[in-house]
């Protein structure tokens, strides 16, 4: 059930909105909302069990060998975050329908939004840490797409790249921490780690793992000093900003600290680092927010500050601090989402977010102004709002926590958090005053704004109403959810506490009163004469915002990389290859220096005369290549001889599958190389100096001798082979007697899937690089003889017409027998490709592609896509039976007349391999042939 909650937006949501977006804008939003509501409904079905104290688990094996499983966990904490993601997501989907203009692509927006939503759900529901990393990085990628949604804007592209660099890099650092933690615990399942916390924390690798994980959390939640990416991501559409800031992207880091708290906290290191970073962030960002002139910029820094507040509470480590932290997560989501929506409404109506130009909007947009005042009051922590309650709890825990720290100045922490509260009140007041009052409306693109449609205001109205209702009735509204979430965070039963408006006259109340009073005074003093408008936050506080530091580091890296590139990238392929070969020889050779490794004592077999003759042919061919490699076509033919000899070696070693594959690959690769070389001069230039020839000779001899020595050392030693496992398990587990094929499609099916994916990418890469490229066909060869492009010989055309059906029948035979006898999808694909290549040669490219309806190679792209899809879905199908990815199913169903038929699901995987191989080969040939398709200029002369 939990997997379906993630799968609905991941597959159905992205596919449906992407397809509908170009056809029906309103229906696309409706489908996006429907998918979100369906996932929310499924989540709420599980809520009663969670409120009853249960933890819901779902698990399927994925890659169990490395500890990666589809493990999902739903407790109070993940219920709260998943509910936020889906509920706020539903509000955003509605809001975006009215916000996006007719020129904005709803297909792009909603499909990316669904992908991002699914990634966030995966993060908060994952029980396996490696699976969490997968979804974590998917949030970075999908947020990159969303932030850069308006790709025509330079600031959007820059903000997206910066966000991806910081959060993606932090994710890689976090992965290192998870790997260390998994090695310590012996598992990547969080549920299993919770049972061995003492063992984990006693390991010497625990502190490095802790620090690496915290770096990932701090980068994602924009904590100091990684805060700068979040304000720069404001170039995204406002619905994206509202979603990122309130319930998703930046909350992921906070969630990670809460999720890992029972495992990581308790040694003092977690508490010291997290509270310090949180306290610095909450104060620093609140100060900067006051001086931002952009509505979304102010809200962005306020988000950073409030995330620092939550981080500080998590680091305090007390059960009541956990209550305050989760309560503020909920409260922040309600007022921050509504404030961003309101900022979007102002921008939508006035086409400006600059508070120096806004003002006087209360008379023009009274409803929007009222919503702003209530939401901003909640952000500032004004009584009777939900923000006031969690701010009071924040102040309380800061006082209690500072007393427990035993610091020299026990008043320092309460003073600092009060100062942060002062700035919070000041920037909240500025948000309202500068936008809706403070004189008449300024010089904005649209000086006559009006209230937006009800559908655009409705999500903000619902969220603002929640700020008031929760502020008045906290125990009834958010109370139960806060309790189960805080219990999951603390990892223990909570002491008695009360979510209420009034707790009497105490120090936290005094701190709140000071924050409100001083905050109002500071803002009024700065606003007098609009002196605040004259302060340039970038000029005054630019280095503190971090952007300049980040850009300086990036520029430095580029300069450093440029200097290295100038030295290394000389444009000489020979030099590149020389460095590559030299480095490989040195690195490999160092392993043998002083090792005393030599030939073993294994008994050697006598070499037959035939084998010696083949070796002699191989040596002669390699020598001929070395001396005649300047003649490119001749060199290609000689390389084909080497491949033929290799095929004979496979035959002698009783490996017919490999021999057939090698032979087919040689035919196809020879054709492809000849087509590619036809676009180049027939002769390569000679080496410029004797020193270069000497260098190449030394590298070639050293490399060849090194490989020969390693082969000799290995072959003359006795070793334990693992072939017995495959020979013994091939039939009972894989359902086939052809061990080689069973290895390819079952035991090592994941590798094969990766290989055909690379093959498809390579072919499509050729299309992307060479599409539209045209060059004149050569008119003469190197001897001056004229090439002829007359009709192909009749004998060739007749032979090709006979070969094609025979080859296709033979392909079916090879394909069907592949699981039990030599054959399979790869070999069958190569045979089909060779037969179709022969049609190209006999009919010409234009006619051959017309008969195949190739559509300039586009059909071959679809073949590649179909092949990869079939292979991938075959692997995913194993999940239906609770088996790991790529596990093969097999049986012997009885068919009338035919009897028992040996069938295996691996045949479908093989079909995917077949289609990918054929599509990739023909696409490459089609592209290479199209480069010189145009007719040459006629000229007289002899015919070559």
Image (cartoon, rainbow, N blue to C red):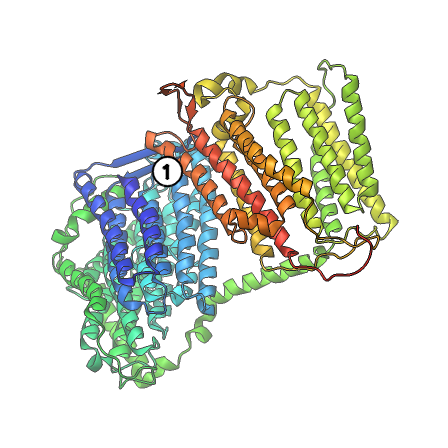
How many C-alpha atoms fall within 10 Å of the one at disc 1: few (<14), some, or many (≥20)? Answer: many
Between 777 and 305, the one lying in front of the other is 777
Q: Quadrant of residue 33?
A: bottom left
Q: Residue sitting at 53 percent across and 47 percent down?
A: 851
| SS state under label 1 | loop
* Residue 387: % across, % down: 21, 61
Q: Residue sitting at 36 percent across and 19 percent down?
A: 896
Numbered label tally = 1
Is residue 315 among the parts visible in the rendering?
Answer: no
Is residue 339 among the parts visible in the rendering?
Answer: yes
Q: Quadrant of residue 371?
A: bottom left
Q: Is residue 110 left or right of residue 33?
A: right
Q: Which residue is mark 1?
A: 128
Between 921 and 544, the one lying in front of the other is 921
Q: Residue sitting at 47 percent across and 40 percent down?
A: 867
* Residue 892: % across, % down: 39, 20
Q: Quadrant of residue 650?
A: top right
Image position of 357 with respect to 13: above or below: below
* Residue 705: % across, % down: 77, 32
Q: Is residue 371 left or right of residue 606?
A: left
Viewport quadrant of the N terminus: top left
Q: Residue lying at the far right in this picture: please name it.
A: 690
Q: Residue sitting at 68 percent across and 45 percent down?
A: 673
Image position of 592 with respect to 757: above or below: above
């Amino acid at each position: 059930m939990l997997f379906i909650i993630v799968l609905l937006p991941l597959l159905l949501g992205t596919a449906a909105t992407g397809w509908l977006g170009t056809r029906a804008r309103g229906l696309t939003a409706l489908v996006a909302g429907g998918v979100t509501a369906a996932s929310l409904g499924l989540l709420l079905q599980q809520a009663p069990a969670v409120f009853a104290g249960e933890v819901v688990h779902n698990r399927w094996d994925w890659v169990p060998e490395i500890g990666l499983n589809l493990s999902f966990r739903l407790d109070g904490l993940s219920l709260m975050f998943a509910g936020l993601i889906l509920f706020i997501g539903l509000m955003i989907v509605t809001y975006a329908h009215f916000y996006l203009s007719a020129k904005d692509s709803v297909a792009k927006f909603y499909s990316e939004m669904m992908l991002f939503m699914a990634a966030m759900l995966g993060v908060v529901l994952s029980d396996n840490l490696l699976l969490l990393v997968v979804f974590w990085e998917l949030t970075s990628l999908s947020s990159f797409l969303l932030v850069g949604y308006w790709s025509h804007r330079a600031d959007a592209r820059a903000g997206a790249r910066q966000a991806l660099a910081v959060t993606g890099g932090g994710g890689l650092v976090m992965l290192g921490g998870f790997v260390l933690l998994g090695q310590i615990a012996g598992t990547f399942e969080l549920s299993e780690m919770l049972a061995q916390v003492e063992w984990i924390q006693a390991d010497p690798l625990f502190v490095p793992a802790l620090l690496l994980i915290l770096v990932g959390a701090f980068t994602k939640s924009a904590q100091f000093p990684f805060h700068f990416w979040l304000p720069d991501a404001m170039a995204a559409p406002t619905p994206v900003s509202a979603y990122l800031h309130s319930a998703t992207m930046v909350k992921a880091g906070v969630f990670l600290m809460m999720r890992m708290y029972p495992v990581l906290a308790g040694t003092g290191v977690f508490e010291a680092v997290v509270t310090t970073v949180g306290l610095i962030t909450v104060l620093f960002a609140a100060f900067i927010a006051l001086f931002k002139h952009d509505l979304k910029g102010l809200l962005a820094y306020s988000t950073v500050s409030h995330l620092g507040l939550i981080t500080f509470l998590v680091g305090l480590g007390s059960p009541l601090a956990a209550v305050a932290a989760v309560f503020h997560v909920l409260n922040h989501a309600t007022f921050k989402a509504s404030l961003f929506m309101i900022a979007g409404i102002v921008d939508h109506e006035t086409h400006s977010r600059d508070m120096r130009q806004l003002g006087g909007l209360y008379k023009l947009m009274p409803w929007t102004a009222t919503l702003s005042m209530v939401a901003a009051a909640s952000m500032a922590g004004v009584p009777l709002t939900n923000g006031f309650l969690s701010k009071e709890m924040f102040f309380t825990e800061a006082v209690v926590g500072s007393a427990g720290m035993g610091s020299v100045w026990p008043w320092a922490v309460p003073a600092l958090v009060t100062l942060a509260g002062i700035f919070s009140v000041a920037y909240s007041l500025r948000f309202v005053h500068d936008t809706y009052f403070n004189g008449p409306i300024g010089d904005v693109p649209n000086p006559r704004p009006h209230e937006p449609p009800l559908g655009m205001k409705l999500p903000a109205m619902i969220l603002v109403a929640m700020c008031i209702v929760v502020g008045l009735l906290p125990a009834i509204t958010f109370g139960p959810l806060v309790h189960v979430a805080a219990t999951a965070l603390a990892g223990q039963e909570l002491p008695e506490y009360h979510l209420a408006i009034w707790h009497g006259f105490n120090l936290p109340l005094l701190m709140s009163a000071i924050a409100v009073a001083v905050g109002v005074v500071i803002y009024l003093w700065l606003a007098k004469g609009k002196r605040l408008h004259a302060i340039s936050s970038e000029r005054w506080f630019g280095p503190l915002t971090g952007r300049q530091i980040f850009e300086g580091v990036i520029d430095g890296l580029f300069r450093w990389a440029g200097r290295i590139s100038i030295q290394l990238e000389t444009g000489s392929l020979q030099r590149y290859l020389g460095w590559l070969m030299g480095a490989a020889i040195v690195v490999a050779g160092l392993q043998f220096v002083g090792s005393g490794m030599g030939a073993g004592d294994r008994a050697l077999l006598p070499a037959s005369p035939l084998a010696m003759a083949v070796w002699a042919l191989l040596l002669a061919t390699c020598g001929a290549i070395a001396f005649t490699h300047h003649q490119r076509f001749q060199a290609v033919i000689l390389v084909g001889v080497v491949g033929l000899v290799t095929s004979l070696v496979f035959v002698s070693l009783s490996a017919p599958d490999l021999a057939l594959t090698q032979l087919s690959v040689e035919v196809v690769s020879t054709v492809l190389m000849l087509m590619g070389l036809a676009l180049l001069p027939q002769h390569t230039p000679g080496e410029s100096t004797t020193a270069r020839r000497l260098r190449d000779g030394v590298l070639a001899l050293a490399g060849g001798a090194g490989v020969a020595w390693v082969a000799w050392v290995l072959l003359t030693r006795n070793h334990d082979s693992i072939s017995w496992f495959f020979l013994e398990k091939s039939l009972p587990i894989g359902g086939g007697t052809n061990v080689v094929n069973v290895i390819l499609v079952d035991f090592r099916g994941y590798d094969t899937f990766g290989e055909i994916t690379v093959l498809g990418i390579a072919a499509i890469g050729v299309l992307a690089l060479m599409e539209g490229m045209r060059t004149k066909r050569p008119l003469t060869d190197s001897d001056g003889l004229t090439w002829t492009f007359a009709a192909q010989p009749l004998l060739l055309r007749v032979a090709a017409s006979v070969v094609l059906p025979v080859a296709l029948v033979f392909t079916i035979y090879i394909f069907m027998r592949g699981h039990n006898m030599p054959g399979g999808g790869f070999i069958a694909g190569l045979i089909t490709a060779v037969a179709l290549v022969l049609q190209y040669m006999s009919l010409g490219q234009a006619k051959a592609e017309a008969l195949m309806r190739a559509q300039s190679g586009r059909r071959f792209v679809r073949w590649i896509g179909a092949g990869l899809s079939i292979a991938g879905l075959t692997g995913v199908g194993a999940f239906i039976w609770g088996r790991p990815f790529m596990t093969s199913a097999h049986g012997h169903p009885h068919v009338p007349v035919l009897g028992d038929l040996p069938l295996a699901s691996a045949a479908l995987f093989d079909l995917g391999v077949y289609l990918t191989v054929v599509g990739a080969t023909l696409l490459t040939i089609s592209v290479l042939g199209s480069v010189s398709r145009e007719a040459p200029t006629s000229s007289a002369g002899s015919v070559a």
